[in-house]
Image (cartoon, rainbow, N blue to C red):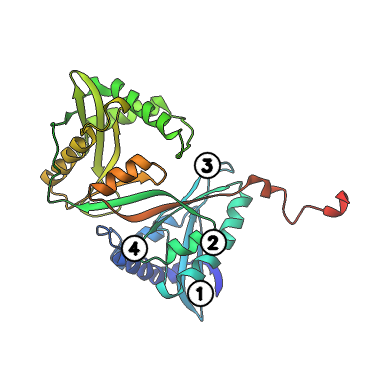
Amino acid sequence: MKVEALTATCLDEAAELLAATQRAGEGPASGVWRASAAAEVIAASLPGALALAAMERGVLVGFLVVPLPGAPGADPVRILDHHHAADPGRARDAYRALYAPAAASLVGFGCFHHVVRVLIEPPGAVQAFGELGFGVDQIKGVQPLGSRLSATGEPGEAGLDDVDELVSLYIELATYHARSPVLRPAALDVAATRSELVDTVEDPRRTILVARDGRRIIGMIEAHPDARHLDTVTIGLNIVTERARSRGVGTALLDGVLGWGLDAGYRHCAVSWASANLVSDAFYRARGFVPFRYELVRRIDPEVSWANERLDYSLLG
């Protein structure tokens, strides 16, 4: 198998591979399930990216488009599910061949945090990247809209007067994720979060529903049109304050979003959650969400930037 640059001459073949992969998935219909749409998406992703093709006997069997950082640094490099595809029968070998030069280039830029999104079906990408040192970080699940949950209470729409309380819920969620087993730094950009909440409240395409105990907000859920999947509403965040958990608040909020999605004409509801978040994982699976996409992560020891083939052991003897 030979790896070379992905050029415009291979674009139609790459588009066919991507469209076939997206059609094979078990989730909602992708916006790139047609080859013509896939070709546009791939072409738009090429500027400023490392684009690689895996060739076998002159035939394209896989491709990988890696968005390169604007400057060297520690920010994660994100390879989305429309940045790659492979022939199912050659997926393992193709992805292994493609990632090797891509990883070398990224490490050369000082990028040691690699993220790739993969559809669970067909399983070739999950297996290949798993064997290359990636682990599941985020899970995206989906369920068809059509039935409502059995829930008590009726959440209401959030307003601009609620933003400060919503920010407090975001901070509580960040500190919760800092606990085991998620163990993520509780580093939240409060100003950016507040601005995003204001924009969401004012956007008619999105919704924030809140649950109250008296006048105090004890939970919230945000939903918006999915950027990549057709006829799908996606939940951004679903937060219930710790003291109000196990009282049906989260179920009532989710039921409210399912109703909002049905009324707006969507056919599916999707949501992403951290694989290590035991509460969210149990909550969404128990309420009908079936995983269809993983976000895989690999963190490389930055010592590789100096402890590599350039290290002259003869000077240390």
Q: Secondary structure at mark 4?
A: helix
Camera-nearest residue between 33 and 237: 237
Say few, some or many: other residues with alpha carbon within 10 Å of mark 1 (under 14 / 14 to 19 / 20 or more).
some
- Which residue is farthest top? 215
Q: Residues within 10 Å of mark 3 (few under 14, many from 20)?
A: few
Left or right: where does residue 93 sit relative to residue 171?
Answer: right
Q: Amino acid at mark 1?
A: Met
The CA distance from mark 1 to mark 3 is 31 Å
Q: Residue at x 25, y 59 (%)?
A: 29
In primary-sequence order, the first of circles 2 and 4 is 4
- Graded by Cα atoms within 10 Å as few (under 14), some (14 to 19) or many (20 or more), the crowding at tag 4 reads many
Inter-mark Cα distance, 3 to 4: 27 Å
Pick whichever, 240 or 64, lies toward us: 240
Q: Which mark is residue 55?
A: 1
The residue under label 4 is which amino acid type? Ala
Q: Amino acid at mark 3?
A: Asp
Q: Residues within 10 Å of mark 2 (few under 14, many from 20)?
A: some
Which disc, if any, is residue 99? 2
Q: Which residue is mark 4?
A: 38
